[in-house]
Image (spheres, rainbow, N blue to C red):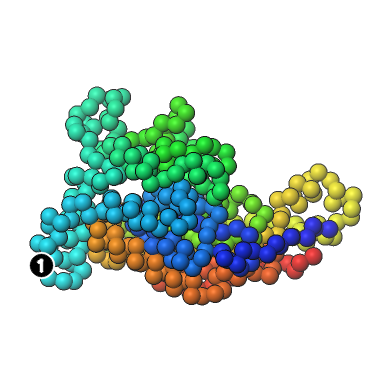
Amino acid sequence: MPRPKPRPKADAARTPGFESVVLVLQGGGALGAYQAGVYEALHGAGIAPDWVSGISIGAINSAIIAGNAPEDRVARLRSFWERVSGCHESAWAGWLGALPGGDMARSFINQFAAGEVMLRGAPGFFAPRTPPPVLRPPGTLGATSWYDTAELRRTLEQLVDFDRINHKSMRFSVGAVNVRTGNFTYFDNHSTRIGPEHVMASGALPPAFEAVEIEGERYWDGGLVSNTPLDWVLDARTERDTLVFQVDLWSARGEAPRDLSEVAVRMKEIQFSSRTRAATDAFRRSQVLRAAFNALLAKMPPELADTAEARLLARASDPAVYNLVQLIYQSATYEGQSKDYEFSRTTMEEHWAAGRRDAERTLSHPEVLVPSDQPFAVQTFDFTSAAGHGRSPEPAPFPKT
């Protein structure tokens, strides 16, 4: 017979009914302020993740969250985002602000701000290389990237307590790609001693940023393979009823483009929305198979249930339930293809406020915090996107045995 699932009482200060709360943060550059706003709303609601996992800018936000005491996290996120935004804005914001209103004017302002970042970098994050890489001999320092991220290391060392991350009070995972093998790698504090280089590797998007060397291997941004760590979280099989807040910065859904500019935007959205839906669908299928095996196991004669093969499948079929709560940033039409490197203070504040607003609206639906009473169930919720219609329950097709 399948072993019963122990369900210890969850800490009501976090979320009722769940044994684990996971925060999953996608990559997206300047759009990452949206994730900070989401976290601010979660913190305000008393929801404390015990695992945070990120890619690229999501890795930086994850490190700030995991590397600080709960009461300091929002302030440290604010410190980072204020540091990297608005450095050049004061010189031209008043002049551009005199333009007529509307999306066209705002698009011009955003493109101007993004151009400033391309030319001058973002403080505390990256700076243009001088001389540029095309004037450097192959194989020399700086020959493979347009920007130097030495400032990011200093920022991380100031804002993140890596000893706290390595103390493992919260699980922490960031993804990167091995440049030599092309293999995806997760740096997880359960198996790796984490330092600034692991976070920087996860965000080393070429050709803007140079690969980061770790133990003799070089790593690029994990978004080259998958821009979300959701599959890593779901494959972990912690055997605990789990609430996942999945914060995506790129929407997979969108309208057909009407011109080349919109083609560039839509291409980025499809490319970097990555494997979110694929990971969710694959996990649902796995849960159905686990439920089927558990139902079959209950009918097996003892001698068959005690075989090595049956015991192996039983260990992989723990009937934990999952709520996947999706928060997907919906970009304004004027943001354009440079929205992931437009670091102006005005836009940062808008992204932050949007994340806080979307998370508060999502949490106003109490069902997102209620686990299914069916084993193996996967419930997904989306109250942010135009296509999102709230709850999409996926109960197991078999009753408890």
- Look at label 1 and name its amino acid: Ala
Residue 387 appears in view: no
User: Which quadrant of the structure image shows residue 120?
Assistant: top left
Q: Is residue 94 left or right of residue 171?
A: left
Residue at horizontal 60 percent and vertical 58 percent from the top: 20
**Along the viewing direction, whichever of 43 and 332 lies nearer the viewer:** 43
Q: Is residue 45 placed above or below 111 in the rendered structure?
A: below
| Location of residue 270 by image quarter | bottom left
Q: Of 300 and 9, which appears nearest the observer?
A: 9
Q: Residue at x 41, y 69 (%)?
A: 358
Coordinates of residue 311 in the picture (x, y in percent): 79, 48
Along the horizontal axis of the image, is 302 left or right of 275?
right
Give the crowd class for mark 1: few <14, some 14-19, many >=20 residues within 10 Å: few
**Along the horizontal axis of the image, is 235 left or right of 101?**
right
Q: Which residue is mark 1?
A: 98
Q: Position of residue 310 (x, y in %)?
A: 79, 49
Image location (x, y in percent) of residue 123: 25, 46
Residue at point 29%, 62% (across, down): 349
Place of residue 360 in the rendered image (x, y in percent of width and height, measured from the top left)? 44, 71
15, above or below 49, in the image: below
Which quadrant would residue 348 be assigned to in this image?
Answer: bottom left
Rendered-image quadrant of the N terminus: bottom right
Determine whether the residue tagged by mark 1 lies in a helix, strand or loop. Answer: loop
